[in-house]
Amino acid sequence: MLGIDYPIIVAPMFLISNTAMIKAAMDNGITAAFPALNYRTDEELRAAIRELKKYSNKPFGVNLIVNKSNLLYKSQLKTLAELKVDFIITSLGSPEEVIKTCKPLGIKVFCDVVDTAYAKKVEALGADAVIAVNNQAGGHAGNIDPATLVKQLKAEITIPIISAGGIAKASHIKEIMEAGAAGVSVGTIFIASEEAPVSAEYKQAMVDYGAKDIVRTTKMSGSALTVINTPYVKEMGTEANFLERLLHKNKTLKKYVKMLIAWRGMKAIEKAAFSATYKSVWCAGPSIEYVTSIRPMKEIIQDLTVGLK
């Protein structure tokens, strides 16, 4: 569908994905996407897309948050359509408008899903593929294990399934494709790349911690988020406190409370990603278990694609 050598997308990671990472993916036979929200202004977003298009004619994508929490959604969609990115990954909302806008332009639309019910809805809307977010994903994870989710989706939909979560080795890719996936979306292991713009401390944490150190917290965003269980996370706790739970139950305030918690949490994550402080909240998935050093993306991709052709 994308004309790449290997069926791998470097997952769009909030604050982390940058043009250097996208270029490394394009140079090594795979593709990548970045979140539109990694760029604060429309000018910055346009500049990043133009830089990548000038660098190579190989495909890359952009992740778009399509719910009301993204105040820039309309302008971002307009820009992505105008500059004709190769594909868009939609998250956290209905992709209907994105699909209607992009289909006539030849822009592929892949939709994050965590279950069959939503997958059937996006297929009916005209999605080109689904990103099957499983319980091994970093950031906002699903609740179903990788193979089970892919098999469930395979039985219910006909469009390609891209498995997201739990991929760190070529053998993982082979296993999930045998279960029915058409490709994979890989994020966590690329945080420990030389191209990633995060702090040296964050990258070293990827080496020092393992799968047993990954926990889910409801304190950083409106939904459960997988993070490394640093001393600060242990001190802070992972469950919403009484007041937060109470406000979440208030129908009038719920939407605004979610937005406030998400904004506050993302600010904390942003600060931790780029500077060394005691208050470190670092997003990652269980695939951290396989990170043993900080390396160029080229080396990580080579290991990931051994024997896939």
Image (cartoon, rainbow, N blue to C red):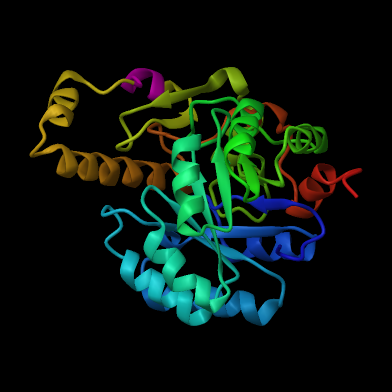
- Is 203 located above or below residue 231 in the figure? below
Q: Which residue is drawn at 18% across and 30% down?
A: 248
The reply to whether the magenta stretch includes residue 219 is no
Between residue 133 and residue 137, name the one nearer to us: 133
Residue that extends furthest to the left in the rendered view of this protein: 252
Q: In this view, does 65 lie to the left or right of 159?
A: left
Tally of marks: 0
Q: Which residue is drawn at 27% across and 52% down?
A: 69
Name the image quarter holding residue 290: top right
> In which quadrant of the rendered image does the N terminus lie?
bottom right
Q: Is residue 123 left or right of residue 302?
A: left
Examine the residues drawn in magenta and state their main secondary structure.
helix
Q: Which residue is drawn at 76% across and 66% down?
A: 3
Q: In this view, does 79 lie to the left or right of 29?
A: left
Q: Could you say where residue 303 lies in the image, as x and y percent from the top left?
A: 83, 43
The reply to whether the magenta stretch includes residue 234 is yes
Q: Could you say where residue 141 lies in the image, as x and y percent from the top left?
A: 49, 33
- Is 53 located above or below residue 99 in the figure? below
Q: Which residue is drawn at 63% across and 45% down?
A: 161
Q: Can residue 124 be seen in this view?
A: yes
Between residue 167 and residue 200, name the one nearer to us: 167
- Is 117 located above or below residue 75 in the figure? above
- Is 242 located above or below residue 107 in the figure? above
Between residue 102 and residue 285, name the one nearer to us: 102
**Range of residues picked out in magenta:** 232-238
Q: Is residue 229 visible?
A: no
Q: Could you say where residue 108 lies in the image, as x and y percent from the top left?
A: 57, 65
Q: Could you say where residue 50 lies in the image, as x and y percent from the top left?
A: 56, 80
